[in-house]
Image: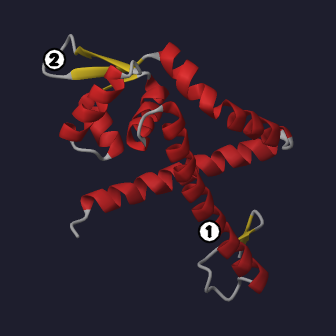
Amino acid sequence: DRLGGAVAGPPDDPAWSDERRLLAMAFAVGLRKTGSLMQVMGQAAAERIGINSTDLNCLNILSFSGSLTAGELARATGLTTASITGVVDRLEAAGFVSRERDVSDRRRVVVTIVLQKAIREVASVFAPMVADWQQLAARYSDDELRLIVEFYDQMEQIIRKHLARLRDSTP
């Protein structure tokens, strides 16, 4: 059964051609390589910025919303609240974040990215790579870009599902 050019079913389905199996394998290898390279890129960027990769990841997560409570940041990263306290201490000392008590619940701490510092010292490290990504995107049609964006949205959901599975399961 064909669905929009795709073959339904698992790779061991007889409907899959040898070429499709090889493409599926290359697809999985490409995802693994990209994930590994992004992790190495994050480490190299963190070293260039003068922070560690965990702190850089927290800054990246904060950049999506601008601010989170310490508990939300802990949940988003999988770190303990004690570890997040250390991260926030280091990032605040370096001038990348500020923290304030939540006005509605004084027990909660809201961590806010210091945008000017992040743009100056973090975004500038990634700007050449982002420019290359933009040049790559320019090669694709709007329909192709919509497909790529949809793919990344679906990948995010798959990763979140398996992240929850790994965090919720007892070894």
Q: Residue at x 73, y 40 (%)?
A: 133
Amino acid type, residue under disc 2 in the picture: Asp
C-beta proximity under 8 Å, tags 2 and 1: no
Q: Is the image coloured rainbow, by chain, by secondary structure, or in one colour?
A: secondary structure
Q: Secondary structure at mark 1?
A: helix
Labels in figure, total: 2
Q: Residue at x 55, y 58 (%)?
A: 36
Q: Relative to residue 128, is residue 121 depicted above or below?
A: above
| Quarter that holds the C terminus | bottom left
Q: Earlier in the sequence, mark 2 or mark 1?
A: 1
Number of residues whose C-alpha sits closer than 10 Å to that of mark 2, classed few (under 14), some (14–19) or many (20 or more): few
The image quarter in which residue 84 lies: top left
Is residue 78 left or right of 159 when viewed as pictured?
left
Q: Which mark is residue 28?
A: 1
Most extreme residue toward the bottom, as rendered? 14
Amino acid type, residue under disc 1 in the picture: Ala
The residue carrying mark 2 is 105
Q: Which mark is residue 111?
A: none
Q: Relative to residue 102, is residue 65 depicted above or below?
A: below
Q: Relative to residue 1, is residue 135 depicted above or below?
A: above
Q: Position of residue 77 (x, y in %)?
A: 35, 43
The image quarter in which residue 71 lies: top left
The image quarter in which residue 92 lies: top left
Q: Position of residue 27 (x, y in %)?
A: 67, 67
Q: Residue at x 26, y 29 (%)?
A: 70
| Quarter that holds the N terminus | bottom right
Is residue 140 left or right of 81 when viewed as pictured?
right
Is residue 158 left or right of 28 when viewed as pictured?
left
Q: Residue at x 43, y 16 (%)?
A: 114
Task: Compare residues 31 and 162 and report the one nearer the observer.
Answer: 31
Task: Compare residues 23 and 56 and report the one nearer the observer.
Answer: 56
